[in-house]
Image (cartoon, grey):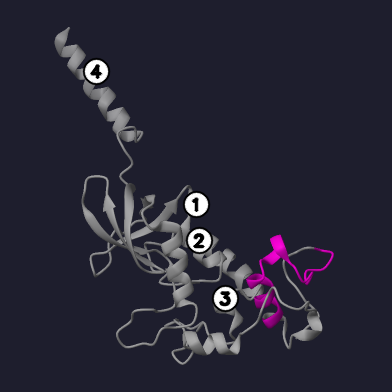
């Protein structure tokens, strides 16, 4: 009887492992200890191991590249990551390949149940990038989110030609953060504006998003359809 009990226990253990009851090997719990930039963070895993993580399938403009200037919307991406992630408990979800050539963990990072990688794309702070097999599980859904951000002219999409949509990708090196601020200066909460104040739909859309988007719309640029896309009659 004792031998039969041992066999049953082993069978139960195998079932639990197969069902994932003993832990999910495809994810880890961690605390964000430092934000390096918009797409790279330092974390401490639950077992005390310290790691550098690189967000999968996204690329934010550079802020600390040794050979590049601070790029437009790079500081905003880093500030958003700092505000959202610093000191927070997060879940690191892995795809098929767990590390890159720099030994960084490649992750879909979730904070408070929200996919942070995806939120960067939604806010126009990152482009979909480095879509390399086998780590492509969320690529399709990310591309859909990017298309919407592009149509609405959010942040990186507000500067014509800034995002290089070629095989090597990246951002135009000549568009620096300070230069972008000069070219896209505005006061969203100043004098009332209408579509005739803008030279293009992208310019109007950028203004609309920075003024609070559909939730605020203090200038009532979104029409009666309330679809989040403004001044659709502009070129």
CA separation, marks 4 and 3? Answer: 59 Å
Q: Nearer the viewer, mark 4 or mark 2?
A: 2
| Mark 3 closeness class: few <14, some 14–19, many ≥20 residues within 10 Å | many
Residue, disc 2: 118
Is residue 46 inside the magenta stretch? no
Which sits earlier in the primary sequence, circle 3 or circle 2?
2
Query: Which image quarter is the C terminus in?
Result: bottom right
Which sits earlier in the primary sequence, circle 4 or circle 2?
4
| Mark 4 closeness class: few <14, some 14–19, many ≥20 residues within 10 Å | few
Outermost left residue? 3
Q: Are marks 3 and 1 in contact (CB under 8 Å)?
A: no
The circle drawn on residue 155 is 3
**Which of the 4 image quadrants contains residue 61?**
bottom left
CA separation, marks 1 and 4? Answer: 40 Å
Give how far across and how far down residue 197 sits, in percent.
77, 85
Outermost bottom residue? 174
Residue 128 horizontal side relative to residue 159, left or right: left
Residue, disc 1: 114
Query: Which segment did they paint magenta?
Result: 203-225
Which sits earlier in the primary sequence, circle 4 or circle 3?
4
Which residue is rendered at x = 67% and y = 70% of the image? Answer: 211
> Circle 2 — which element?
helix
> Circle 3 — which element?
helix
> Circle 4 — which element?
helix
CA separation, marks 3 and 2? Answer: 15 Å
Residue, disc 4: 8
Which sits earlier in the primary sequence, circle 3 or circle 1?
1
Query: Which image quarter is the N terminus in?
Result: top left
| Mark 1 closeness class: few <14, some 14–19, many ≥20 residues within 10 Å | few
- In the depicted structure, whether residue 87 falls above or below residue 177: above
Residue 19 horizontal side relative to residue 170, left or right: left
Which residue is rendered at x = 18% and y = 17% of the image? Answer: 6
């Amino acid at each position: 009887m004792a031998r039969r009990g041992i066999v049953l226990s082993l069978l139960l253990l195998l079932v639990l492992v197969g069902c994932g009851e003993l832990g999910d090997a495809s994810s880890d719990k961690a605390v964000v200890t430092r934000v390096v930039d918009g797409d790279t963070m330092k974390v401490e895993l639950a077992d005390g191991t310290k790691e550098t993580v690189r967000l999968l399938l996204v690329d934010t403009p550079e802020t600390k590249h040794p050979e590049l200037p601070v790029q437009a919307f790079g500081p905003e991406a880093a500030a958003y990551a700092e505000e959202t992630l610093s000191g927070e408990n997060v879940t690191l979800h892995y795809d098929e390949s767990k590390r890159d050539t720099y030994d960084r963990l490649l992750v879909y990072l979730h904070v408070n149940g929200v996919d942070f990688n995806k939120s960067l794309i939604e806010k126009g702070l990152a482009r979909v990038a480095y879509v390399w097999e086998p780590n492509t599980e969320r690529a399709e859904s990310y591309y859909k989110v990017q298309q919407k951000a592009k149509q609405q002219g959010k942040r990186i999409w507000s500067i014509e030609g800034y995002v290089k949509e070629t095989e090597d990708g990246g951002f135009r090196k000549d568009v620096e953060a300070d230069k972008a601020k000069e070219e896209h200066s505005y006061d969203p909460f100043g004098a009332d504006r209408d579509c005739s104040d803008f030279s293009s739909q992208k310019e109007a859309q950028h203004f609309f998003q920075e003024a609070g988007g559909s939730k605020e719309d203090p200038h009532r640029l979104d029409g009666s359809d309330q679809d989040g896309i403004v001044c659709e009659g502009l070129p």
